[in-house]
Image (cartoon, rainbow, N blue to C red):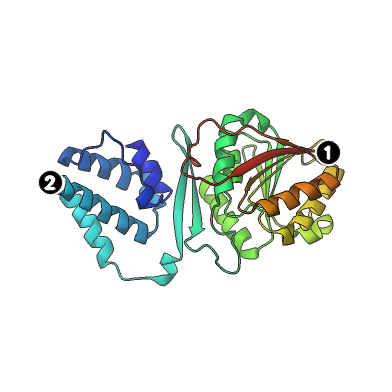
Amino acid sequence: MDQVLNQFLTMKLLKDFEWPLAFKYSEAAQRDLVEKVLKHPISVRYPPSRSYRTHFLKTLIGKVEAEGEEVIEDIYGSYASLMATPHNEDEDRVCYKSYHLGNSNYVSLKESTQMISNGTTGLITWPAAHYFVDWCMENKHLFEGRHILELGSGSGLAGLAVCCGCNPASFCFTDCHEGVVQQLNENIAINVPPPQVGSGLCIQVLQLDWSDVEDVLPLGPNMVDCIVATDVVYDTDIIDALLVTLVHLFRRYPCAVCYIASCVRKKETYDYFTAKLAETLITSEPQKPPQYRALSGGHDQNIVLVRLTR
């Protein structure tokens, strides 16, 4: 049932939903699903969108009926309750998604249900972040005890996964959009409560425009030894500013290492990035893909992860 739970919590498209081959639609199996998925503490506290839950239950009811089984009252009742709830546009604009990091460890995020919201794409999680998290969980030693700066943090999945799963000394989230920074703070509060923040892990959130990086970034000379970024190489219009930022950071923190995960949607865009990167004398080394694709297994996009040094 863990497989069903993890797909449900990330709102995996129902057309791509993978039902376990051993799953039967008997009354006992339905009750097991209700208890372990619908009533799971994370499902209750940080539920997927109402629309997703409604369609999930409708799909489940259809599968049970197709098998000639009787749908139990808990499932029908939950579906009827969602259908009877008045439509609320504000509520439908946001949802929670929870990502499994292994064991009982999850990162729960408040995200937008729209690809573009409030003039930014930073309020949802993108495929390269899923890939990066899978890779980080297999390479935790690279981040343990490190002072990490993230560029373009977005909703915070990559950074929070590192904070919760890799034991860094400090982590600085950054993004240029005020609304994204506000949501980042909310997501940090969900996953790293104040007592844990005060117990050793130092977390900072900065609004950072790459065009003003020299003036805005108020970190000390020895406060960064690792830089991370996901899905920041998607438009040639921002690549020059990104590279200026990287050059500045490597000049300020010459011993730092940088990891960038990118979804290659247009080959010419990524080629532009690699060509411009070579001009800066920053060395790029591709990294092996993660062996276990817990979050990124359903993606068919071409994703590249590189290690940068100066």
Q: Residue 247, image x and y in percent?
A: 83, 48
* Residue that numbered label 1 is attached to: 310
Q: Which amino acid does label 2 sit on?
A: Gly
Vertical comparison of 111 with 3: above or below: below
Q: Residue at x 40, y 42 (%)?
A: 6
Q: Which of 5 and 172 is in front in this view?
A: 5
The quarter of the displayed image where residue 169 is located: top right
Residue 121 vs residue 147: left or right? Answer: left
In the rendered view of the protein, which quadrant contains the C terminus? top right
The quarter of the displayed image where residue 28 is located: top left
Residue 26 in view here: yes
Q: Nearer the viewer, residue 74 or 258?
A: 258
Vertical comparison of 19 with 114: above or below: above
Between disc 1 and disc 2, the foreground one is 2
Secondary structure state at the residue bearing disc 2: loop
Q: How crowded is mark 1: few (under 14 residues within 10 Å), some or many (20 or more)?
A: some
Q: Are marks 1 and 2 in contact (CB under 8 Å)?
A: no
* Residue that numbered label 2 is attached to: 68
Q: How many numbered discs sit on the rendered protein?
A: 2
